Amino acid sequence: MLTIDTTRDLITTLVVNGYHLLSYSRISTSYNILVLYKYDSFGAEIRYSILLTDKIPSNGILGTLTKIKNRTNSKEFAISQMNLELDFDSYTYEEFYKKIGGVVNTGLVRSPVLSGLMNNLGLNLLSEGLEGAPNDLLEIYSKECLQYLFKSPARRYGKDRSFERLPDGVLLVKNISAFLFDSKAYSNGFEFTSDDINRFEKYIEDFSEKYSHLFAVKSFIVISGRFNDSDEAILNRSTDLLSRAQVPIACIQAKTLAEMVAEIMKKPEFQQSIDWNQIFVKPVVKLSNLTSQIKKIEKDKII
């Protein structure tokens, strides 16, 4: 039987490696058909129809795949646990994961000056030795920090936002949760507007339309060097988004995100026991939210 976990793992890898899900059809317990697309360097959309199967596909299934391929103007291929002999490309899961390259972790979070670096980027400043635009670098470092903390793959959308309305990135957590995130590099600090909430709502709606059968959006994380809104004002913004999209806002200073990474690096054995879902749904995320969980784990003496 082709399990939902197998499909979810595959889609996670594809999303993290630059693909977008267009449609997902669960034909039966043995056959799924995914339609995905990605953009080339010039913004052209390239589509793929992927048959996932745990058995030799029947003529009927192959006919359905051909119809989907023709309707979506896509290239078809199959992925299976077995070696298939078909008139088009097919891969085992091992071959496919090797071909696509899996999830790459650059290890940027291991910089000994991460806290100061992140603080500067959040305030639209470059630390010595860094090159590039602070807003781009803040996206990259935020993605790496979140990926490290949750031990889950994250994707920075980057240039794809030139062609679609997308947040800076998404974190896909193993327990079927998703966290959308936006980083804000503002020299004078970031302050919410109604347009921001409208945009976040649209991001959540678009993501849920494609992936709600696989991932539930847990919160919308906003990362910046400083927030000019009061905690009460941020709570009101979070409540507003929650009422409209059933997803709260979680604001965290860039420096605090880096400090959380440093805290976990000191106590890596606690990482799997931290309830990150509980931390990153708070309107204002603080380092104390993490350290209090660590103290509780230490007191329980389970680890």
Image (tube, rainbow, N blue to C red):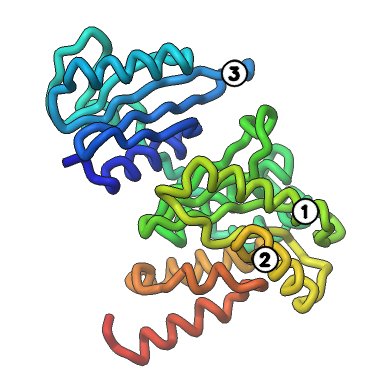
**Badge 2 element:** helix
Q: Residue at label 1?
A: 196
Q: Position of residue 228 (x, y in %)?
A: 83, 68
The one nearer the camera, 114 or 273, is: 273
Amino acid type for the residue under numbered disc 1: Asp
The one nearer the camera, 276 or 125, is: 276
Does label 2 or label 1 sit earlier along the sequence?
1
Quarter where residue 116 is shown:
bottom right
Q: Position of residue 132 (x, y in %)?
A: 70, 37
Amino acid type for the residue under numbered disc 3: Ser
State how far apart marks 3 and 1 are (Cα): 29 Å
Q: Tell me the mark number nearer the camera, choosing from 3 and 2.
A: 2
Q: Residue furthest front?
A: 60
Numbered label tally: 3
Q: Is residue 154 above or below residue 283?
A: above
Q: Is residue 98 above or below residue 234?
A: above
Q: Residue at x 60, y 62 (%)?
A: 247
* Quadrant of image for the C terminus: bottom left
Does label 3 or label 2 sit earlier along the sequence?
3
> Where residue 41 is drawn, which disc sits there?
3
State how far apart marks 3 and 2 are (Cα): 38 Å
The one nearer the camera, 299 or 60, is: 60
Q: Is residue 85 above or below residue 271?
A: above
User: Is any part of residue 116 visible from this angle?
Assistant: no
Amino acid type for the residue under numbered disc 2: Ser
